[in-house]
Image (cartoon, rainbow, N blue to C red):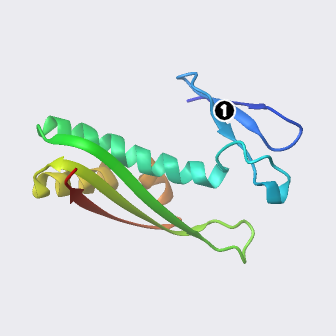
Amino acid sequence: MKVILNRVDENFHFEGTGASSVPVNIDGSVKIGGSNSGARPMELILMGLGSCGAMDIISILKKQKQNLKDFKILINGERDYNQTPAVFTSINIEFQLFGDLDFNKVEKAVNLSMQKYCSATAMLENSVNISYSFKILQM
């Protein structure tokens, strides 16, 4: 896997691209001299973790012939700002699935993703406490 980061301005704004060639903007906050033109690097870690799990879950639910109408993921990462580097100390993920879904099938899909298939979870789980839950909601 290869990504390229190209600097956009004289400060912290970068545009990243990977195999898909779809640009991702990354920047720092105004507080540190950035222009607030993109996601923060640590936000991207949380987004990567959540989307990795979501792709597994969607794939499993499709195989189970579940009618998933929509999907939202809420992720909260806690960092210890008294330490350098200020790494995540805990991450909580809440998967919100919308549709007429079988609870047991969703539970199985979520657990398989988070305990077996998600590479991002496997990479992070030895350094940070990752908890997760799910809700089935009607639209």
Camera sees residue 126: no
In the rendered image, the vertical position of residue 87 relative to residue 4, given as above or below: below
Query: Dot 1, crowdedness within 10 Å: few (<14), some or many (≥20)?
Result: some
As drawn, is 70 to the left or to the right of 64?
A: right
Q: Which residue lies furthest to the right in this view?
A: 10
Amino acid tagged 1: Gly
As drawn, is 124 to the left or to the right of 73?
A: right
Q: Tell me the element at label 1.
A: strand
Q: Residue at x 74, y 36 (%)?
A: 14
As drawn, is 16 to the left or to the right of 96?
A: right
As drawn, is 57 to the left or to the right of 7?
A: left
The percent coordinates of residue 33 (x first, y second) are 86, 52
Question: Is residue 23 or residue 84 the one in the foreground?
Answer: 23
In the rendered image, the vertical position of residue 59 relative to residue 116, given as above or below: above
The residue indicated by pointer 1 is: 16
Question: Is residue 11 or residue 87 the one in the foreground?
Answer: 11
Q: Which residue is drawn at 72% across and 78% down?
A: 82
The percent coordinates of residue 23 (x first, y second) are 62, 28
The percent coordinates of residue 106 (x first, y second) are 18, 53
In the rendered image, the vertical position of residue 54 relative to residue 94, given as above or below: above
In the rendered image, the vertical position of residue 62 relative to residue 80, given as above or below: above
Q: Which residue is drawn at 75% across and 50% down?
A: 28
Which image quadrant: the N terminus? top right
The percent coordinates of residue 131 (x first, y second) are 38, 67
Q: Residue furthest front?
A: 139
Res 108 quadrant in image:
bottom left
The mark total stands at 1
Res 78 quadrant in image:
bottom right
Question: Is residue 8 or residue 17 the one in the foreground?
Answer: 8
Q: Which residue is drawn at 15% across and 35% down?
A: 63
